[in-house]
Image: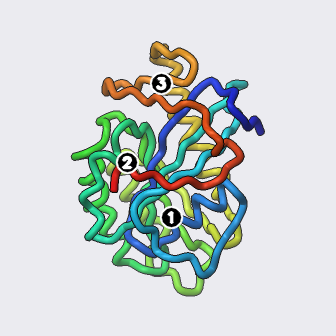
Amino acid sequence: MAEGSNYDYLFKVVLIGDSGVGKSNLLSRFTRNEFNLESKSTIGVEFATRSINVDGKTVKAQIWDTAGQERYRAITSAYYRGAVGALLVYDIAKHQTFENVIRWLKELRDHADQNIVIMLVGNKSDLKHLRAVPTDEARGFSTENGLSFIETSALDASNVESAFQNILTEIYRIVSSKSLESSGDVIRPSGGETILVAPTADDGGAKQKSNCCA
């Protein structure tokens, strides 16, 4: 896997969904291969990065994570700005978190670029004995709403790599097929937003806190 300041594309991907569904652990599992059972609710916004190879190009993902609690909803516009991908996460053992996906999807449609790539993620697939959301129900919802779909477990790492690899590959192919003008670390999603993030010390995958949206 390529890492460091040399990359061909930089994509901002946001994690959304109810509090407690495992967004922060998906982030840490993908970027640092870590899982924290005592993980606290995220306050404000934080992001981490990791670079992967897609079709021979180095794609750097800047993955943003924020709290799902209602009281932090004021940060939405800045949080979504420039995002070209979103992982919409629910807990397979808590049906309410799946029901709330409809609200999160509406928020995405209201605040994010209209061409954002969205993946529905059923997390905590290790809790099979507690499953409350049938896979077929979630897959059907995804099909109806034009989303890709995967079930993951941040705890045992099942499908976490695949989830991020799949969404980043889809974003890359859309962007490259449109031959969007790009130079160095500037990517212009079709909505006209410009993502401009200079390489920083976070390239080792370290998590950084951002105060831009608080």
Q: Residues within 10 Å of mark 1 (few under 14, many from 20)?
A: many
Disc sitting over residue 187 in the figure: 3
* Left or right, residue 192 beside residue 160: left
Q: Quadrant of the N terminus?
A: top right
Judged by depth in the image, the label closer to the viewer, 1 or 2, is 2
* Left or right, residue 126 beside residue 88: right
Where is residue 66? Give x, y as percent: 42, 60
Where is residue 137? Give x, y as percent: 41, 66
Mark 2, secondary structure of its residue: loop
**Marks 1 and 3 close (CB-CB < 8 Å):** no
Mark 3, secondary structure of its residue: strand
Q: Residue at coordinates 65% horizontally, 42% vertically from top-left?
A: 201
Q: CA distance from mark 1 to mark 2?
A: 20 Å
Q: What residue is disc 1 on?
A: 23
- Nearer-N-terminus badge (1/2): 1
Q: Residue at coordinates 31% horizontally, 36% vertically from top-left?
A: 113
Q: Residue at coordinates 59% horizontally, 81% vertically from top-left?
A: 38
Disc sitting over residue 15 in the figure: none
Disc 1 residue type (three-letter): Lys
**Where 47 sits versus 36, above or below?**
above
- Nearer-N-terminus badge (1/3): 1
